[in-house]
Image: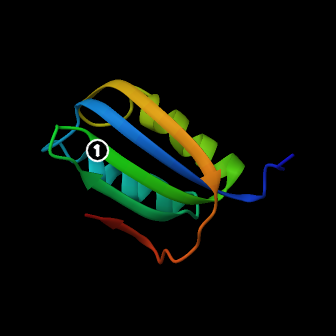
Amino acid sequence: MTGENDAVRLTAWVAGRVQGVGFRWWTRCRALELGLVGSARNLGDGRVRVVAEGARSHCEQLLGLLRSEASPGRVDQVVEHWSPAAGGLDGFVEE
C-alpha cells in the first residue's frame, strides 16, 4: 500500500487539441508549482505525453488539472499509467 507522500511516476497521454496552444508550458508550470519533476512531450499523433514524479498526492493533483477545463486548448481524453518512481529526472522540461 502506498501513502499519499510516497514517490510515484505518473505517465499521462493527453488527447485533444493540445499541441500549438501552450499546453506543455502550462503543464510545466503546474508541475513545478506542485514540486514535481518530469517532462511534457508532443507526440507525432497529436497527443502530449506527460511524465511526472513526486508525491502521489501531487501527481493526482496534476492529473486533475490535466483533465480540467483550465488547461489550454481542448482535452478530450487522458489515459493514465502509474508506476514506482524511477528517478533520474531533473526539473520539469518541455520536449
Viewer-proximal residue among 45 and 15: 45
Viewer-proximal residue among 50 and 28: 50
Q: How is the image coloured?
A: rainbow
Residue at position x 45%, y 74% in the image: 91
Residue 40 horizontal/vertical position (percent): 34, 55
Residue 34, quarter of the rendered image: bottom right
Question: Which of the image's four quarters has the C terminus?
Answer: bottom left
Residue 27 horizontal/vertical position (percent): 38, 50
> In the figure, is residue 39 to the left or right of 63?
left
Residue at position x 28%, y 44% in the image: 48
Q: Which amino acid type corresponds to the residue marked 1 in the rendered image?
A: Val
Residue at position x 39%, y 32% in the image: 70
> Residue reaching furthest top?
76
Residue 8 horizontal/vertical position (percent): 66, 56
Residue at position x 38%, y 58% in the image: 28
Tell me the SS state at disc 1.
strand
> In the figure, is residue 86 to the left or right of 70?
right
Q: Which residue is mark 1?
A: 48
Mark 1: give few (<14), some (14-19) or many (20+) Cα within 10 Å: many
Q: Is residue 90 above or below residue 70?
A: below
Q: Is residue 54 above or below residue 4?
A: below
> In the figure, is residue 55 to the left or right of 19?
right
